[in-house]
Amino acid sequence: MFFTRKFHSSCSAKLVLLTVIGLGCAGTTQAQCTQKISELPASPELRGFKLGMTKEDVKTSVPQTVFGRTDAFGVSKTTINPYFDSRIDKPRFAGIRSVSLDFLDDHLTSLWIGYDETFKVQTIDEFIKLISESLQVPDQWLPWKSRGRQLSCGDFQLIVTTVAGGPSLRIIDTAAEDLIAARRQAKEERDSAVETAADGIQSGEEIVGDRQTHIFYTSVCRAAKDIAPANKVIFKSVEDAEKAGFKSADNCH
């Protein structure tokens, strides 16, 4: 009887202890980073750059900036090297090796800053603490690749690594990255449709367009045969159909 009471008492104490431990763990759950790009403060470590600024804004800030060409997806890139351009304001970029900027539709969507060996902190841990306080984000970074760290927030991602003996920081607009990926995929699908249509031309098929829907098919498609004669237009090539404002059918049916 004594053993039974002692056993229950011991179990109850353990249960209470486990409950307290559980509550303690719940209270120390890692904070999620919910900040948005629009909420990021003007950090001195960013030297006046911020996601969303236009090329004109960058040119006003650093007149020596030369932008690369814009590709088919609306992306352009440039790099600012304070070490190698004597016209750049050296005190403003003290401790910085280079700055790389990526734009989508003429707005800054990726900012990478490489700091040199004279920067005020050098280790990853010190740098992360500095950036967390400066950008007012939670100090809950996760491992990234071999020695880097990363933090995903509401609509942006932070990546910290070491390059050429100094820390580096990259801020990425994740929504912009998704949009670029969607544009690339859409182009691949269009190219595939054009290639399929071109294969039909090579086998002697015609390109048949529908004036009403502005969609074109190869002549073997049943849909091409269903086009009313008044709406039917024949093209010599896929290129001619596209120049006329027609789009390739998603499938042949």
Image (cartoon, helix red, strand yellow):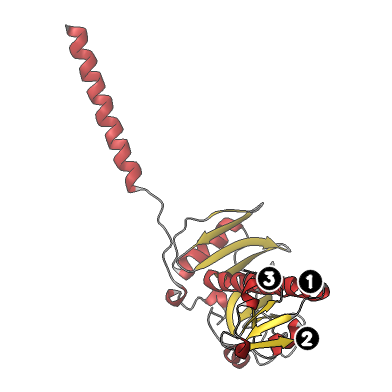
Q: Residue furthest top?
A: 1
**What residue lies at 38% left-to-right and 49% top-to-bottom?**
29
Given this view, does label 2 or label 3 mark the residue nearer the observer? Answer: 2
Residue 180 vertical placement versus 6 (above, below): below
Looking at the rendered structure, the secondary structure element under dot 3 is: helix
Separation of residues labelled 2 and 3 (CA atoms): 23 Å
Looking at the rendered structure, the secondary structure element under dot 2 is: loop
Question: What number of labels is visible?
Answer: 3
- For residue 199, the mark is 1
Residue that numbered label 2 is attached to? 236
In depth, the one of 189 and 211 nearer the eye is 211
Question: What's the amino acid at mark 3?
Answer: Glu
**What residue lies at 71% left-to-right and 62% top-to-bottom?**
165
Q: Which badge, 2 or 3, is on the more N-terminal residue? A: 3
Residue that numbered label 3 is attached to? 188
Decide: few, some or many residues near mark 3? Use Cα within 10 Å; few <14, some 14-19, many ≥20.
few
